[in-house]
Amino acid sequence: MSAKQNRVKARQPRGFVDRSASDLRAQDAMLATIRNVYERYGFEPVETPFFEYTDALGKFLPDSDRPNEGVFSLQDDDEEWLSLRYDLTAPLARYVAENFEDLPKPYRSYRAGYVFRNEKAGPGRFRQFMQIDADIVGAPSVSADAEMAMMMSDTMEALGIARGQYVIRVNNRKVLDGILDAIGLGGDGARRLTVLRALDKFDKFGVDGVRQLLGAGRLDDGGGKGDFTKGAELDASAIERVLSIFSFADAGGAARIAGVRDAFGDNGRVVEGLDELETIRSLAEAAGYGDDRVSIDPSVVRGLEYYTGPVFEAELLFDVTNEKGQKVQFGSVGGGGRYDGLVARFMSQPVPATGFSIGVSRLMTALKNLGRLGVAERPGPVVVTVMDRDRMADYQRLAGLLRAGLNAPGQPVVPVDVFQGNPKQFGKQLQYADRRSAPLAIIQGGDEKASGVVQIKDLIEGKRLSAEIEDNATWRAARPAQVTVPEAEMVETVRRMLAEQAADRGE
C-alpha cells in the first residue's frame, strides 16, 4: 500500500468550526464585557462538566428511548448513558440539587461554555456552539424576572448596541397556555404546538401570515416552488380571537396588556400571566427601562415545554442581508424565562428559577455587522532572530530579559518569540516575523555579541519605508528603522519603540 493511500484526509467535521486567534480574542473580550455586567448584578461564576448522565438532562432532551437522538451520547464502563450537555440550564439544575444545602438561596450564578447538538448541520446551524447564561434559583417573585430583563438590556448596551437597535421582549407562558385553553385546545398537544409556532412567526410573516398558519396553512413564496406549512386548522372565530392579541402591536406595553385582557380576560391563567407582566413592566419602568428597552410582546414564544412563567427574548432590530440577498431584521441573540419545574425533578420540594442564555456566536456576528467587535489583528511577538545555531543559550537569555522586563503584572502581555526554524537564511526569519505581524526583531551576530550590543529592527516602520526606497544599494546604505544599542539598554529601547508604534495606531 502506498504512502498516499495511507494518508489521512484533513477534513473538518460537519457542524463544527475552527476558530482563529482574532476570533478567540474577540470572543474573550465580548465575554469579559458580559461577565462584568453579570457580576455587577451579584452573579458569581460556576462551571459544570461537558458530560451529564443522560437522564439528568430531563424529559425535554433527550428522548430516553433514543439516548442518541438530539444529543451526543455514549455508555461508560458501568453501562450508564452519558451525554454531552445540550444546554447550560439542565446541568445547573443538577448542580443546584446536588449542592442545595450549601448554596445561598436565592442562588445567582453565571456560566459560559460550549454546548452540543446532535442535529443536522447547515448554514449557521452548528453542532457545537458557546452560550453564556445567568440564572437566579430560589426566587419565586417575578421581580427576579424583571431583573433578568433589565440586566439583558444593560448587557446589550455594554456591548455597544445602542438603544433603538435592540429590545428585550417579554411574554408569559401562562398567557399563551391560557389562550390555547380558551380556544378549546386544552388537551390537543399537536395543535397547541402548531398554534404556538404560528404566533412565533408574527415578526417574520405579519398578521396575514399568522392567519394562514392558524388556518389551513401557508405556502412560502418560492416562485411556485415554495414549501407548504400545514396550519392548525382553527375555525375563523378562533383565528380572529387569537389574532386580536396583535391589535396593539405598535402600542406600548400597557396597551398590549390591556388588549389581551380585553380578548381573554375571562380565562384565569391569562389573567394571572398578565398580572405578572404588568408587575414586570412597572418594575422595569420605575428603574428607567421603558418600552424602548424592555417591551411586553404577546408574540414571544420560547421553550414550548421548558418554561412555566415569564419568557424573554433579546432581539436586534437593525437590518442585515441574508443568504438570498434580502434585507431582513437580524433577530434574536438570546432568550430565557422562568422554569420552576426543572430543579424540582431532582428534589422533593419545588424550587423556583429564572434565567437567560445568550448565543455567543450569533451575538458575535451581530457585533461584527455593527462594527462593534474588536477583531483587528494585534501586534505579534517581538522576534529574537538566530544568527548562530550554537549560540541558542544567548538568544534564550535575551528573550528572557525581554519577557521579564516588558511584562509588568496587570498590563497587556508583550509576547517574545525565539526563532526555532532553520537559521541559515536570515531572510526567511524576517518573512516569519512578517507573517506573525511582529513589531520588532532582535538581531545579534558574533560581532554584536563581542561588542555587547544588539540591533533592534522596527519591522512596522521598515515596511513603510521600503515602499519609498526602490534602489537596493540605497536600502542597504540607509538600513532604515534599525538601531544598535548596548544590551543593558535593550529592554528600555524596545519598550519605547513599542510605545511609539502604539501611539501611531492611536492607542
Image: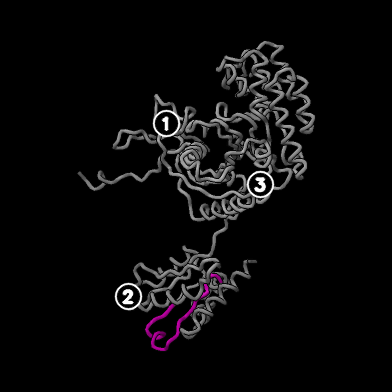
Q: Amino acid at mark 2?
A: Arg
Circle 2 or circle 3, nearest the eye: 3
| Residue matched to label 1 | 55
Magenta segment includes 445? yes
Q: Which residue is mark 2?
A: 389
Of tags 1 and 2, the one toward the viewer is: 1
Colouring scheme applied when the structure was drawn: one colour
Q: Is residue 352 magenta?
A: no
Disc 1 residue type (three-letter):
Asp
Task: Name the residue: 37% across, 79% down.
Answer: 394
Q: Residue 412, percent across and down?
A: 55, 66
Q: Earlier in the sequence, mark 2 or mark 3?
A: 3
In the figure, residue 139 lies in which quadrant?
Answer: top right
Q: Which span of residues is magenta-colored?
A: 443-460
Identify which residue, 402 or 39, lies in the foreground.
Answer: 39
Q: Determine whether 227 is above or below 323 in the image.
A: above
Residue 362 found in image quarter: top right
Q: In front here: 301 or 471?
A: 301
Give the mark nearest the N terminus, 3 or 1.
1
Of tags 3 and 1, the one toward the viewer is 1
The crowd level at tag 1 (other Cα within 10 Å; few <14, some 14-19, many 20+) is some
Question: Which residue corresponds to mark 3?
Answer: 156
Give me the C-alpha separation between circle 2 and circle 3: 53 Å
Decide: few, some or many residues near mark 2? Use Cα within 10 Å; few <14, some 14-19, many ≥20.
few
Could you say where residue 133 lies in the image, as x and y percent from the top left?
A: 56, 43
Q: Earlier in the sequence, mark 1 or mark 2?
A: 1
Q: Which residue appears at 57% of the width and 26% of the height?
A: 304
Residue pushed farthest bottom? 451
Real-space Cα separation, disc 3 to disc 1, in angstroms: 35 Å
Q: Secondary structure at mark 3?
A: helix
Q: Can you tell which mark lies on residue 219?
A: none
Secondary structure type for disc 2? helix
